[in-house]
Image: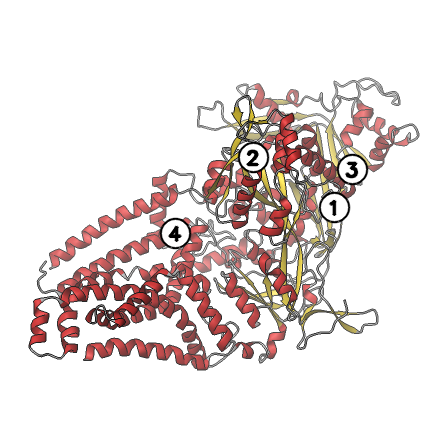
Amino acid sequence: MTIKRILILVPTLVILFLLQSYLWVPTYEEQTKGNPNRLHEYITASTGDATSLNPIISSNSTSSQIESLVFDSLLDRDEELRFRGRLATSWEISEEAYFYLNPHAVIHHAMTSDAGKTDAEGIVRILREARKRVTDLDPVLKATLNRIKKIMIIPPEKVVTTTHYKPAKEEKEEKEIEVIIQAPARIKLSLTEVDQDLFINLSKILGNDYFASFDGVQYLKTDPLVDKKRLAAYAKEYLPAIEHNPVIIFHLRPGVRFHDGHIFDAGDVRFTYEAIMDPKNLSPRTADYEPIKEVEVLDSLTVRIVYKRLYSPALGTWGMGILPEHILNQEALKKEAERLGKDPDKFSMRQSEFDRHPMGCGPFVFKEWKSDQFIDLDRFEDYWEGSPHYKRYVMRIIPDLLTQEMEFYAGTLDSYQVQPHQVERLKKDPRFQSFSGTSFGYTYIGYNMRRAPFNDVRVRRALGMAIDVNKIIDYVLYNQGERITGPFPKQTDYYDHKVQPLPYDPKGALDLLKEAGWLRNEEGWLEKDGKRLEFTLITNSGNDIRKAILAIAQDGWKQIGVNVRTDILEWSVFIQERVHKLDFDALILGWVMGIDPDLYQIWYSNQTHPYQLNFVGFENREADDLIIKIRQEYDFEKQVEFCHRLHKIIAREQPYTFLYVGKWTAVLDKRIVIKDFDEDGVMLYKKIKPTKTGDYTFHFNRWLKIPEMPQLLD
Amino acid sequence: MFSFIGRSIVQKIITLFFVSVVSFLIIHLAPGEPSQVDPMNPKFTPEMVERFQKEFHLDKPLYVQYLYFYRDLFTGKIVSWKDSQSVLTKIWERFLNSLPLFIVGTILTWTLSFPVGIRSAIFRGGIYDRSATFVSYLLISIPGFFFAYILIILVVTTLHVPVIGMETFGLGASSWGTTLMDRIWHLLIPSVLGATGGIAVLSRYVRSQMLEVEGQDYVRTAKAKGLPPEQVHYKHALRNALLPFVTMFGLILPGLIGGSVIIESIFSWPGMGRMAYEAILARDYPVILTVNFVAAVLVLVGTFISDLLYLVVDPRIRL
């Protein structure tokens, strides 16, 4: 019968046709061993595709990995996590500080001859005299005065500016009003280093309330309708009594070229800054650059960046890839818009083809990006530091980890990010070399300190002591984790290793709870004033490790008589409904940290409102003070000291039960080595070693794959 | 006939409108924010959240957003939030990638299911029928990703050839013949995997339909006339058993755009399903809604086609 025959024949033929293609396909051997070019290619994989390859727009890890190869930045961190110059050869950080003359303040300091009210010249005289009299001053003040390089008077000036004003909340219309600022004389101090205590120290000479008693409102004239509160806000904005303006001067590397041969210069740095701040580009990185007052090009190889206020994370923000101005400036974008037939007024970098065809001055040149398949890069022969040994870098997008693993074994991937349970097995494999290190993130249980009983530190500490974290690390993480005691990344100097983790001590926990008034009743449950100790512990779904911790914590707490309910919520419900609205008792969550120790958003006491990140409601005066100081301190040693103090306070208060920081492990083909030269210029191969901070790709540009298994000394 | 077509088109447009409203509402009422807005990132200030929401029109009332979205969709200007690419171009590219998988899978499913199911029906209760039933239910109940993994591991370890992706990675410059065959090889496992599930389900339907028809008088008559059994089953019975499959055939059209998330992810196949899935995770509303809209259109076109097919295959139906 024809129908039957067709129904059987057609699929058979189709399958046979599909099967015969096997004869044509290159085997893995042909691709790897049989392919001489394979040695010059580095192929890695990522589970997710990049979104954009423009460093000012993208915000995911695949994108930034590619960007770090295509673009170069002014500086980055070296093996010890200290800053290291890249496109910048060196930099100087200094400060310009300003304060307004306060004609009403009375100065009475023993060592000044100009006692009483004084004018600008008088102030300058006082400061100069104080600087000369070095003998009898307290050393801190002396150090501050020694930093002052230059003192200048800015004569009084009148400025007229317009601003928008909404007369009342109910009214929608905004009114444009004129503000006349009749500024008094201002003193400008040039300092050799940034000094956050400058004005505190100067007030030892000028009087304790010299700066505080300055009232800007009297120098403002505006529409009589403006209320007092608003007026005070204007005064603060236009006439701040004191102002710190840190200054960074970058000296750029001469002769660096973009991939198209165009010479990199200071204009590109300024352009990158402007591009980030341009609202049209909608950059997610504006917060880092908002404190910048101006970026000034001094000459083609010198940029001067002035900040509006003390902001110590500033230097680190220049680890940002530098964009080529000549490709992306207004004119170029306009031309592109016209070519694509789009409205030039609405056309921004987000629409530009640059997004998918980036070009910078990094070690690799962008070649091709096939969405959800691969991103292909070629080495840049003219790279200023010497071109990388690998000729080609490919990032394949393989969403499934098992297929990644298969491809790695087959040799079509050079590296594989190992899952915790595979670490032991793959470490022993002679074909591979494995690296492991501490990650930049930790997992914790956070308590809502607005709610009883979590407002009592003894309860928080006791709850922490009832969980056996070592067991979590051993059994849930297959030993791929370490204990952590505070909010800083463990491999940085900011982390205080002297702080001891909470011991696992259910007995001690019960004693603490007893002290706090919680006693076990006949049934074994903890009770206080007839009320049981019970609450709900929540976390997000889709994370098996957190789910396991949830059960372990629940069990640990149950054993000391705490009745815990648990709940697992979908991520966005968890964040939007519970975390943001502060509607939780306790939760399991993690933070991924940067290197910079600024913790303002997570721990400062004014960040405890809904939709803010201090959702546990941690409020501590001393901690607040330290957080601000860390944020404003430019001196590394001092910053470390402040961080250690903050670490101790947070560990003492236990707003979180800090659980662990994970470890990452990567395996590489063993034939990949570092090619280097010794002092005599003799070439030698070295084993790849991760840096102290766990970055094994730090020397990537000198990596090389050799045909035979190497016999290397460590 | 023509009045039927006219009426049907008007009805479908009205349905489409309601589908568009409901899907828009569901997606906007579901919790979550576009992945560009990262509320858990300390560097993400409220001003930035506001600016993103303004850019994406999320600060506008829902009906305004609805109008904006469909205006952009119909003028072809709709762009993805994730990478500012044109959504229609993206969908078209992915559609072309998914198409071969769909075609091969469909051919295999819609041919093999019939002989398998019919044989089961003819020898009802026999060993063949029992084992076919067993295998079918086994295939239906074991998740597809499991088979996929097993197959990948088997093929990679025994044959040492790459199976993932649309083509061998790093094939480089080779003749067009090799390139084509390489692509066909990569098609084999994912499409066969997709088809096995389909065959398992469809052959069950065929079997039960055939069982119903085989008991009819005209089949007995045909047998009594002395017609060869093949002709009885494949001509007299099958034709009448086919009616429900006409409806089902119309409904495979939306499968074009749905693709298979799991198969595409495991095989790193850059297809439709994976794009839609990732768009959902990233709350990339323009992509989600466009895919949704296209799928709705395809469903309606599919039902329309099956209505017309009904007219052709069943002379009793007059519209």
Q: Which mark is residue A493?
A: 1
Secondary element at tag 4: helix
What amino acid is labelled 4 in the image?
A: Ile
Q: Which residue lies furthest to the right in this view?
A: A135
Residue B55 in sight here? yes
Judging by the rendered image, the residue that carries numbered circle 2 is A615
Image position, residue B264 (x, y; %): 42, 63
Residue at image point 84% right, 26% down: A126
Query: Which mark is drawn over residue B288?
Result: 4
* Chain that bears disc 1: A
Q: Are callouts 3 and 1 both on one chain?
A: yes
Place of residue A599 in the rendered image (x, y in percent of width and height, measured from the top left): 65, 39
CA separation in Å, label 3 and label 1: 31 Å
Distance in Å between CA atoms under marks 2 and 4: 32 Å
The span from disc 3 to disc 4 (Cα, nearest Å) is 56 Å
Residue at the location (24% across, 69% down)? B117
Residue B210: give x, y in percent of width and height: 18, 67
Residue B128 in percent (x, y) is at 27, 72
Amino acid type of disc 3?
A: Ser
